[in-house]
Amino acid sequence: MAEGKYTMVVNSSKKSVDMMVSGSFTPEQANKFIADYNSKLSGIKADEFVLNFDCRDLNLVTQDMIPSLEACFQLYSKTGFNKVVIGIPKNSPILKMQLGRLGRNNKLNNLSVEEIY
């Protein structure tokens, strides 16, 4: 499995936060992601922004990563984005189901998981 990687760009003119997430993450990598997220997004008015994820190269979620992903989804919910969009590859029903369930379980009611790649 590919090592987990991410990029995070705040686009103030488009009122979006654009992220790319790929591979499989360790709990340590997830903690670094959360720290970077808190640092980069501390100065924005999140309710005016859309959080966009490009997850075309994200691996299926493993059981040991569910707690870390739940913490991330809770963080997105608390941040208060106008909308959260997760783009995944077409014909990825298991990944779509996993991400959708994580969103529902963590009260991320403005989440949209879309098969767009």
Image (spheres, helix red, strand yellow):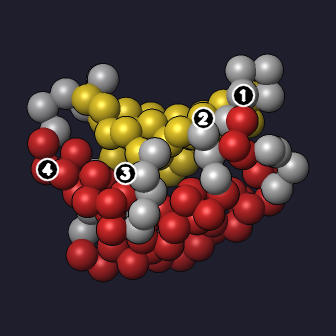
Classify mark 2: helix, strand or loop. Answer: strand
Q: How far apart, in angstroms, are the residues tagged by discs 4 and 2? A: 24 Å
The kind of residue tagged 3 is Gly
Is label 1 or label 3 in front? 1
Q: Residue at x 12, y 31 (%)?
A: 91
Q: Are marks 3 and 4 in contact (CB under 8 Å)?
A: no
The kind of residue tagged 4 is Ile
Q: Residues within 10 Å of mark 1 (few under 14, many from 20)?
A: some
Question: Looking at the rendering, in which quadrant would you find the C terminus?
Answer: top left
Q: Residues within 10 Å of mark 3 (few under 14, many from 20)?
A: some
Q: Are marks 4 and 2 in contact (CB under 8 Å)?
A: no
Q: Nearer the viewer, residue 7 or 12?
A: 12
Whichever of callouts 4 and 1 sits on the residue coming sooner in the sequence is 1
Q: Are marks 1 and 2 in contact (CB under 8 Å)?
A: yes
Is label 4 or label 1 in front? 1
| Badge number at residue 50 | 2
Identify residue for label 1. 15
Identify residue for label 3. 23
Q: Residue at x 45, y 57 (%)?
A: 108
Whichever of callouts 4 and 2 sits on the residue coming sooner in the sequence is 2
Q: Is residue 69 above or below residue 100?
A: below
